[in-house]
Amino acid sequence: MSILTLSAFDLSMAEGKNI
């Protein structure tokens, strides 16, 4: 996995958990 992919996934997860 690329760092970019990991970052995007982490961001998506964080946003989903935040909302």
Image (spheres, helix red, strand yellow):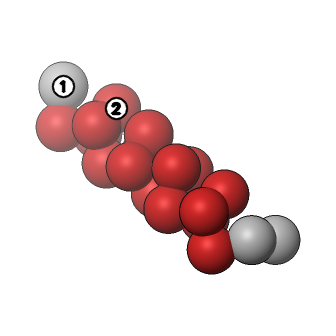
Q: Amino acid at mark 1?
A: Ile
Corner quadrant of residue 13: top left
Tag of residue 4: none
Q: Point out the residue furthest to the left here.
A: 18
* Secondary structure at numbered mark 2: helix
Classify mark 2: residues with Cα within 10 Å, few (<14), some (14-19) or many (20+).
few
* Contact between labelled residues 1 and 2, with CB atoms less than 8 Å apart: yes
Classify mark 1: residues with Cα within 10 Å, few (<14), some (14-19) or many (20+).
few
5 or 19, which lies in front? 5
Q: Residue 18's x, y, as percent?
A: 18, 37
Residue at image position (18%, 25%) is 19
Q: Which residue is mark 1?
A: 19
Q: Residue 15's x, y, as percent?
A: 28, 37
Q: On the rendered structure, is 17 left or right of 13?
A: left
Q: Is residue 15 above or below residue 11?
A: above
Residue at image position (66%, 57%) is 5
**Quadrant location of the N terminus?**
bottom right
Q: Which residue is mark 2?
A: 16
Q: Is residue 3 above or below residue 8?
A: below
* Secondary structure at numbered mark 1: loop
17 or 6, which lies in front? 6
Q: On the rendered structure, is 8 left or right of 14?
A: right
Residue at image position (34%, 32%) is 16
Q: Amino acid at mark 2?
A: Gly
